Amino acid sequence: MSFKFYKQGFSLLLITSVLFLSGCASIVSKTTYPISVNSTPSGAKITVKDKKGADVFTGNTPANFKLKAGAGFFSKASYSVIFEMDGFEAKTVPVNFSLDGWYVGNVLFGGLIGFLIIDPASGAMWKLDTEFLNETLSGVSPETEEASLKVLELKDVPDSWESNLVRMN
């Protein structure tokens, strides 16, 4: 009977220490998140840059990769996905993280170390705002010249225009 009490006491101590010595978000949440990126038309080149401007991923759509949630102690990550394709305008789309609700769980469950150290250091206090990006690229319109009057010398007129010339005296 004393062994059973010892075993239950040890289990309670283990559960209590896990709650007090770890972060709620680091137990339930992630430090990296998968994201899927697609475009219309498919096959666009994508470059993912972090908030310092460093490339963290390059490839073509459709693409799947992981992004870190944290960017340092108490600092959330943010990224920019740049879509590029010949004949289409380049497009930049932000990817952001926000505070994970499980991080606040540290207050409720008494995880002071998790609240102040583990979750902020690991990035587990942040969650990805969206798991999918599906962007439609706009075609580049040909640049049109504004209507204007130009005076040309006869030698500068293209040969194909000569039949349309009218002699003025």
Image (cartoon, rainbow, N blue to C red):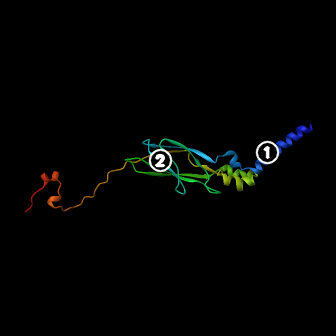
Q: How far from the left and from the top, in percent, is residue 57?
A: 52, 48
The quadrant of the picture occupied by the C terminus is bottom left
The residue to which callout 2 is attached is 46
Residue at the image position 38 percent from the left and 47 percent from the top: 86
Q: How far from the left and from the top, in percent, is residue 68?
A: 60, 49
Residue at the image position 16 percent from the left and 51 percent from the top: 160
Of marks 1 and 2, the one in the foreground: 2
The quadrant of the picture occupied by the N terminus is top right
Q: Secondary structure at mark 2?
A: strand
- Type of residue at label 2? Ile
The residue to which callout 1 is attached is 15
Instruction: Sort mark 2 into few (<14), some (14-19) or many (20+) by Cα contacts within 10 Å.
Output: many
Report the side of 31 relative to 160 (left or right): right
Residue at the image position 24 percent from the left and 60 percent from the top: 148
Q: In the rendered structure, are the residues bearing label 1 and label 2 in contact, judged by CB atoms less than 8 Å apart?
A: no
- Type of residue at label 1? Ile
Report the side of 127 relative to 24 (left or right): left
Furthest residue toward right: 2
